[in-house]
Amino acid sequence: MRSRWVPCNTQPRGAVPSPGRHLVPGTASRVSPAFLESTQHFLKGFTGESPCRAVPAARPAPPPAADIKRARAAAPARHTMGNWLVNHWFSAAVLAAWLGINIFLFTYYFLFFDRNDRYFYTRAILGSALAWARASAKCLNFNSMLILLPVCRNLLSFLRGTCSCCRRTLRKQLDHNLTFHKLVAYALALFTAVHTIAHLFNLERYNSSQQATERSLHAVLSKMHLNGSMWLNPIHSNQTVSAGPGPGPPPPPAPLTHLPPLQTVEYVAFTTIPGLTGVIITLVLILMVTSSTEFIRRNYFEVFWYTHHLFLIYFAGLVIHGIAGLVRGQTEESIEEVPPQRCVSYVTYKDEDCRHECCKDPEFGSIPAESWKWVLAPVLLYTFERILRVWRARQKVVVTKVVMHPARVLELQMQKKGFCMEVGQYVFVNCPAISLLEWHPFTLTSAPEEDFFSIHVRLAGDWTERLIDTFQQQKLEMPRIEVDGPFGTASEDVFQYEVAMLVGAGIGVTPFASILKSIWYKFQQNDQTLKTKKIYFYWLCRDTGAFAWFNDLLASLEQKMAESGKADFLTYRLFLTGWDSSIANNVALHFDTTTDTLTGLRHKTIFGRPMWNSEFAAVAAAHPRSVVGVFLCGPDALAKSLQKSCHQHSSLDPRKVKFYFNKENF
């Protein structure tokens, strides 16, 4: 069943302007060489000559060559650092600050544990591995504090929509929340590896120092205060160890009944609180990082979803990891009474006749646990975030209409009390009949002016397939749907730009459906506050079926803008990137008709992919002093091409054109 949007059928299409008035200069409808080759042989059977001369006749007249030449000259010939900074200077500043703090923390605490007198005797046993372990631990705490903030979606939406000091530059940074989340996760994995390796060396040195029989400093320190709580080496032995030859008499052995049981490296790693929690945290991180790869998320989303919730175990283990305090240092009282620089020689050699310069044995205490101080605030913030989302998701959602579009695209129109949205936002959707725990993001395709909100679901995995099948079964009772959101995205800022370029690939057109519908309503209501003066819309699809559900909206917009006297406000370009011989033959037979044979629209479908350099050059020539917002909902490969074009065609001169790239991230 095909969707019907009421406004598109209220007026005749006779008032729609000629497509030539909408086309961007220099970007007239192009037919790719592959398409021409596929139709040339077919038409020869009717005309006896090549159609290559006939196809360009359907194109609008190209702009003067001088205009294109000036546009290309205005664009930089290559990607320069200055042009890159136009789009990314704030992101670069944030990244530099994050790297700088990590470097500072690691360097400061490495030098602190490598030189501070409190850890003089600890370094005698562990060497530089102590500093490596403790410095990486501080960086782990810092990044654990940050890892949850980018996924506090309500916080980000608040900063984006209601914070008065939230300028365009900051809002663009909020769009990179998941990128920053991944970056912090990689840092956690790196510092965890450094911390784990350093502690493996520490445990081995603790063990070798405890088993040593000579009267070296590390051997004596390892056997000091074994019967009390002031020990330094966490690995204790139940065997009497001879002191060996030395300048002084050996100390008397302690009674066997007073010594703790035999302890080894494995015993400490798997039975003590720091050891066991360290093993658990490491395993959890390995599972979370490996299940977050692109391949797993695309093909086995459930694996990614469930393993990512192991973060609860990670934070619980992190908080209690340092409670036992196996790594120790000399206590403050002992340092004042027994300074290590002066008394170190008395540790390995003691004169029984010592009367004047005698030093007592140093006493040691644990390093206080500090991880909870770092993560307490973000954990509480995230807990509040989850409570809010659960409460909001439990509110009743009424599915008012179900539409099945071509290419197995399911449209759900819903209503929910108190639901308020902006263009380009998205929601998380759960269907308890399919899974109680799985929530999937979908862009809203309705406009804020409508009395319902809608999503379009394309078949892309087990969950979406089961959702489509569930609604296709036509049961008497509609399946229950839970909705969490809406949440802000980059597309919210589209009306903040004088000129906007909207690029959608396949189902990635959904956020722009909301924008274009909202534009229709703004024209309907004669909204004078609209800042945007021009919109270029590009839609790339692999098959013709994807165009079907969007045709009515584009035709209605075409008509409404002509009636409003703003026919040049919207320029849309539809690109078909995949076709067969039947499509090619049909188009070749009707290439000279006024409407497109595939969509029925006045603008002809273009076969192939856009030439982005030409598109950007034409926009720059048409708007030489404007700030252009480029918005994409599509694959990363397309994002790289658009970013490159934004960099190349942005001018460092504040009086000239600038392109700002924005991408949807869920």
Image: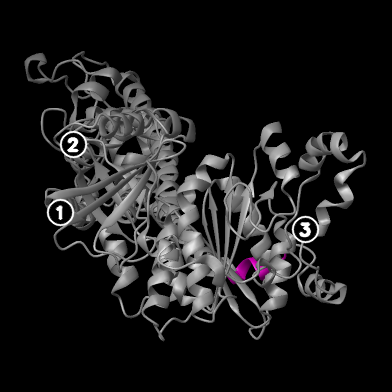
The residue carrying mark 2 is 479
Of badges 2 and 1, nearer the viewer stands 2
- Distance (Cα) linking label 1 and label 3: 54 Å
Can residue 104 be seen at all in this image of the molecule?
Answer: no
In the image, residue 131 lies at what x, y percent? 40, 44
Say which of marks 3 and 2 sits in front: 3
54 with respect to 601 (left or right): right
What is the x, y in percent for residue 412?
29, 46
Q: Nearer the viewer, residue 338 or 296?
A: 296
Q: Is residue 505 above or below residue 307?
A: below
Query: Which residue does the image show at 81% across and 71% down from the upper left?
Result: 68
Q: Is residue 186 visible?
A: yes
Q: Position of residue 103 (x, y in %)?
A: 47, 56
- Estimate how packed mark 1 is, as few (under 14), some (14 to 19) or many (20 or more) residues with alpha carbons within 10 Å: some
For badge 3, the amino acid type reads Ala
Which element is circle 3 on? helix
Q: Which residue is mark 3?
A: 58
